[in-house]
Image (tube, helix red, strand yellow):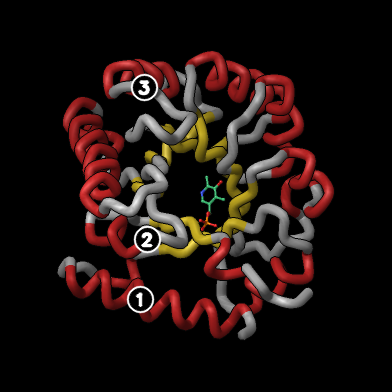
Amino acid sequence: MRIAQRLADIRERVQEAAERAGRDPKEIEIMAVSKFQPRSRIDEAIASGIRYLGESRVQEVEEKYEEDRRNLPENVELHFVGQLQRNKVAKAVRYVDCIQSVDRDPLILEIVKRCERIDKRMGIYFELLTAEETKGGYLDFDSLMRGVEMALLYEHLEIKGLMTMAPFVEDEKEIRHSFRALAACRELLVRRFPQLEGLKLSMGMSNDFEIAIEEGADIIRIGSRLFEGIQV
Ligand SMILES: *Cc1c(COP(=O)(O)O)cnc(C)c1O
């Protein structure tokens, strides 16, 4: 099966999950998490209609894309979704449109510093840790909220959403619990900072995206279900 067929299958499931939840499937974006994938497959995904790409290693970003994603179509966004070390920030901000894995205050300050230097406005998502088994993310709502409060001060940042990873477990209830925690976090944040109305929820991966959609995901991050086993 080629990527276009995989994507058609995913879209069908997205539609069914959205309908179960009484949501409009057109509002749900599918990100292709293209880590470890060669450019040829990424281009195939774009040709199939993918508009969001997710990468998790700065070195790989450097190898596959040009600065300011110049070798990508205008309407495609490149997001960083992996854990970001401070010493890689300067490089990352030159390549990507958005960093979804903002998980600590010092990282915010480093992103600001590096973006100011090249005068680039960076989209950011705040990552919340919603399950013990996963790693990365602010540990609780209060610390995340303080990070948001700080980020709001900087014009080189645009707060676009919240991100989380559910635990890798069989138990659907545990997975749902993670996604609900992120949705609740958005509600509290928007109540506190009304200017953040429209904040997106980035949640759901290959094995749990249907549950994420039922719980309000705006953007799902799909890797293996789109790419695994596809010939180069
Ligand atoms: C790899 C990865 C994904 C995609 O995972 P799959 O299970 O392969 O769909 C999504 N989000 C993040 C942050 C990832 O690192």
**Amino acid at dot 1:** Arg
Label 3–label 1 contact, CB within 8 A? no
Residue that mark 1 sits on = 13
Label 2–label 1 contact, CB within 8 A? yes
Judge by depth and name the residue closer to the eye, 72 or 102: 102
126 left or right, relative to 142: right
Mark 3 closeness class: few <14, some 14–19, many ≥20 residues within 10 Å: some
Q: Residue at x 41, y 43 (%)?
A: 165
Residue that mark 2 sits on = 209
Task: Note whether 109 is above or below 135 in the view shown.
Answer: above
122 left or right, relative to 18: right
Disc 3 to disc 2, how far (Cα)? 23 Å
Residue 73 percent across, percent down from the top left? 69, 65
Mark 2 closeness class: few <14, some 14–19, many ≥20 residues within 10 Å: many
Residue 114 percent across, percent down from the top left? 68, 23
SS type, badge 3: loop
Disc 3 to disc 1, how far (Cα)? 32 Å
Q: Earlier in the sequence, mark 3 or mark 2?
A: 3
Question: Quarter-wise, where is residue 190 in the image?
Answer: top left
Q: Residue at x 55, y 85 (%)?
A: 5
Question: Quarter-wise, where is residue 48 in the image?
Answer: bottom right
Task: Note whether 227 is above or below 114 in the view shown.
Answer: below
